[in-house]
Image: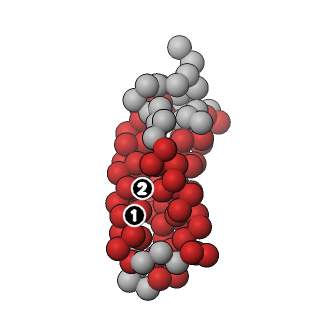
Amino acid sequence: MTITQHDPYVEVGDDDLASVILEAFDAGREMPPHDRLVEIDNRLRDEIDRLVTYAQRLADRAVYRSRQWYALVQAIDRAEDRLQFQLSATPLAGALHVAELARRVHELRASGGVS
């Protein structure tokens, strides 16, 4: 089994998640209300938690210090670092925050071989 094979645990055919990611990336232009930013924040945090678990399993199986191992470890570290920050009450800072969470979801999915 190669590390890049898809795991059904990670496959997300969730249109809701895709729309949340798009909404997060557009939040800086659209400036959704704070309540919506909270919903986006929670959904992306849940997805990051799920993907970090999977990426950690892949990193454990990857050849130590290989490119794939480094990519996974870096994606995990950046995602966990981003989770330390809380959503700001100001619209622009909140929009930038959810956009960064969406980037971390995208990076974790890409490093784990999930389209």
- Give the image location of residue 29, x and y in percent: 61, 75
Q: Is residue 55 above or below residue 3?
A: below
Q: Residue at x 41, y 62 (%)?
A: 40
Q: Residue at x 55, y 22 (%)?
A: 5
What amino acid is found at the position of numbered circle 1 in the picture?
Answer: Asp
Q: CA distance from mark 2 to mark 1?
A: 5 Å
Q: Is residue 80 above or below residue 32?
A: above
Residue 88, picture quadrant? bottom left
Q: Is residue 2 above or below residue 64?
A: above
- Give the image location of residue 34, x and y in percent: 39, 77
Q: Does residue 113 appear left or right of residue 8 in this picture?
A: right
Residue 23 makes an appearance in the image: yes
- Give the image location of residue 85, x and y in percent: 40, 70
Residue at the spot of label 2:
44
Residue at the spot of label 1:
41
Toward the bottom, the furthest residue is 90
Toward the top, the furthest residue is 1
Q: Residue at x 48, y 56 (%)?
A: 20
Disc on res. 85: none
- Give the image location of residue 42, x and y in percent: 34, 60
What amino acid is found at the position of numbered circle 2 in the picture?
Answer: Leu
Residue 78 makes an appearance in the image: no
